[in-house]
Amino acid sequence: HIGALALTDPLLVEEFDPQTPFSPQLEAAHGDVATIYDEGCVQTHREEPGAGVVQVCDVDNYGARKTIVLTGGSFSTQWYPAIQTVAETEGWRLLVIEKNGCRLQSDSSEKYCAKWNRAAVDVIASYEPDAVFTLGTVVEKSETLAEHIPVSSLDPIRQLTESGIPVIGVV
């Protein structure tokens, strides 16, 4: 199936057979998640006992050259396979400090994120990482707000950078 490739070449659309099956199959999408979820150390988004505890996934230690922290909600975890590959190649220690559905921010309208967010920056800083990789911008479904940096993300970023920890923000 050509999917988004159709946007690059109109001739592909004309030549495309709509009976061509998707590859991989659509049913496989639900299970296509980063392997870090298999470790059992990514905090759930559900409101349940212990859900406010900041867990640390310390399973990718390829050396002591650098320590990198990946955090910022399940969208940031989508970057895990790529960052894990770089960590292995470069001899880094990769820590994943993650709570699904919770961006790293100073406040949250989501009740289940508030407690976790209050503790996450201190836990991250305690590892003295060489850098923190997190979400930098969001895209709103709004005509007035396109891609932007949420104001609530600035406080934790400021806290980390003032502690001498660089923050790498991506979409």
Image (cartoon, helix red, strand yellow):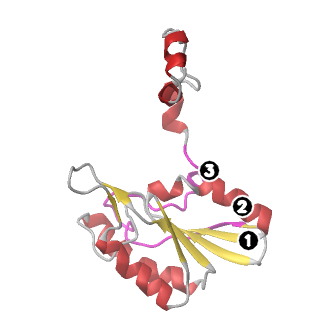
The x and y percentages for residue 112 are: 30, 65
Residue drawn at the location 58% of the way across and 26% of the way down: 24
Front: mark 2 or 1: 2
Calculate the distance from the C-alpha at mark 2 to the C-alpha at mark 1.
8 Å
Q: Is residue 19 left or right of residue 115?
A: right
Calculate the distance from the C-alpha at mark 3 to the C-alpha at mark 1.
18 Å
Which labelled disc corresponds to residue 92? 1
The reply to whether the magenta stretch includes residue 82 is no
Residue with the mark numbered 3:
35
Task: Considering the whole magenta stretch, tell me its main secondary structure.
Answer: loop
The reply to whether the magenta stretch includes residue 48 is yes
Q: Magenta region: which residues?
A: 33-60
Would you identify the image quadrant in which residue 94 lies?
Answer: bottom right
> Does the CB distance between marks 2 and 1 fall below 8 Å?
yes
Q: Quadrant of the N terminus?
A: top right
Residue with the mark numbered 2:
86
- Seen as rendered, the residue at the extreme bottom is 163
Calculate the distance from the C-alpha at mark 2 to the C-alpha at mark 3.
15 Å
Q: Is residue 85 left or right of residue 140?
A: right
The x and y percentages for residue 142 are: 22, 50
Mark 1 residue type: Trp
Q: Secondary structure at mark 1?
A: strand
The x and y percentages for residue 103 are: 39, 65
Residue drawn at the location 51% of the way across and 34% of the way down: 29
Mark 3 residue type: Thr
**Picture layout, residue 72 above or below residue 156:** above
Mark 2 residue type: Val
Q: Secondary structure at mark 2?
A: helix
The crowding category of the residue bearing disc 2, from other C-alpha atoms within 10 Å (few below 14, some 14 to 19, many at least 20), is few
Residue closer to the observer: 53 or 69? 69
Whichever of labels 2 and 3 marks the residue nearer the N terminus, that label is: 3
